[in-house]
Image (cartoon, rainbow, N blue to C red):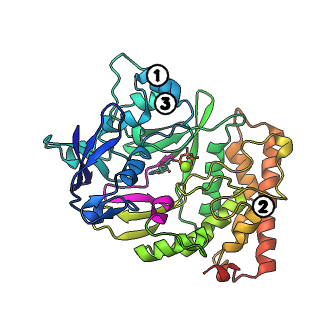
Amino acid sequence: MQYLLMHKRIPVVPMEIDESTGAITFLGALAAPQHLPIGIAYSGAEVDRKSLNDWWSGRSIPASRSGLREALETMGVSSPQLLLTKCFGLSLSDQYWVCPENSGLKWEDVNFFDHPFSDDVGNILFGDAPANDDIDLTSPDNTSDGQLRKKWKVIDGKRCLLKGGSNPAQQEPYNEAIASAIMRRLGIAHIPYSVELIDETPYSVCEDFITPQTELVSAWHIMQTSKKLNHMSNYQHYLYCCQMLGIPGVADALDRMLAVDFLIVNEDRHLNNFGAVRNAETLAWIGAAPIFDCGTSMWHDRFTEQIQPLGKQTSKPFRTDHAEQIKLVKSWEWLDFSALKGIDEEFREIVKGSPSIDEARLDALCYGLKKRAQLLQENVRTRGREGTGRDER
Ligand SMILES: Nc1ncnc2c1ncn2[C@@H]1O[C@H](COP(=O)(O)OP(=O)(O)OP(=O)(O)O)[C@@H](O)[C@H]1O
Ligand SMILES: [Mg+2]
């Protein structure tokens, strides 16, 4: 079927999508190069089809999503790519969509920021049986990324993302909340998360931080905008790409993100878990995205006896050990350790009442967090407040 790839109201490139696979099989002449998704290769009016196909399929629910197979079965859809056109590829994290040729549809008619959407896909992804046989697939959940079960829901008129945890401790939602508390105390730009129990299962809840005027671009896509030179580290390459694109404040934002990830022992800060925000109409860059997705941290998948704040702690995205990654921080001038006083007790309050985290685990977590704060302070003291990342510039 023929579509136009749209960036909000701007037609970007005509394309043909094979309805049986969901793949882009043909691309017409590029009409608005500046409005192509960031990092997509093109030459003249010709867009690299593989590059756009990767972007398009990367927009669908990842194969690794918890409960996906069962959900697809319930919906009677053979692959998550086939869900994309059911919602015109619309998302609540950016302004791209596909307009069926000659349909006359406008962004104003279809976008999920202003229009209600079906709860069916989200409920099915959460493992609930559909309310009736007539499943409505018009949902921004069709374009949601990440491994954990999640759904968009309108709460008090606001678009919110509800996200579950994983076994054994279902700890990720609580980790999101403690990370929010740390960043609130330290004055770091972040997405505030709270925890909600639904049928004795914890979920994190956060508001959509994207508006109809803005969009999130992942670090991964930013890093595709130029070829990495061999002598450059990924850290240097990311800063270089941000500089070339004109994204302000990225080095300072990275300092804060690496420090938070050290504190909470985040193991999964991959390149789609941070990025930048731009104005989707003027294309002006606003800056680094506020920090989101901090749940895969605090030894969430370890047994209580394995909660060990000292020693090697796996990190991403620039180094594999937090003790090494923290050395990339350029400046510590902004960090007021006194603001972290009693953070372990705040964690205790947040987790209190959790059906899946017992007293012994909570004690170990609170001790672990306190210890990480001490370790960070020692680290800063021995290396000096100026930081040590200067050689990485
Ligand atoms: N509050 C938000 N507003 C807008 N978009 C968001 C928000 N939170 C998350 N997203 C988008 O949804 C994606 C998935 O969310 P998130 O990273 O929290 O899920 P996850 O399952 O924890 O991911 P992972 O597989 O990295 O662990 C993000 O990469 C981002 O693009
Ligand atoms: Mg994520």
**Which callout, 1 or 3, points at the residue further toward the start of the chain?**
1
Which is more toward the observer, 84 or 193? 84
Q: Is residue 31 above or below residue 117?
A: below
Q: Amino acid at mark 1?
A: Glu
Instruction: Tell whether position 223 is magenta.
Output: yes
- For the record, the magenta segment spans 206-224
At 36% across and 16% down in the image, what residue appears?
133
- Residue 337 at x, y = what percent? 72, 71
Residue 245 in which image quadrant: bottom left
Q: Are marks 1 and 2 in contact (CB under 8 Å)?
A: no
Disc sitting over residue 73 in the figure: 1
For numbered disc 3, what is the local secondary structure? Answer: helix
User: Does mark 2 have its CB less than 8 Å from ligand 1?
Assistant: no
Q: Is residue 289 visible?
A: no
Q: Earlier in the sequence, mark 1 or mark 2?
A: 1
Q: Residue furthest top?
A: 133
The numbered disc on residue 372 is: 2
Disc 1 under 8 Å from ligand 1? The reply is no
Q: What is the three-letter code of the residue carrying label 3?
A: Leu
Nearer the observer, disc 2 or disc 3? 3
Residue 61 appears at what percent x and percent y? 46, 39
Residue that badge 3 annotates: 125
**Counting residues from the N terminus, which is met first, the one under dot 2 or under dot 3?**
3
Mark 2 residue element: helix
Disc 1 crowd rating (10 Å Cα; few below 14, some 14-19, many 20+) is few
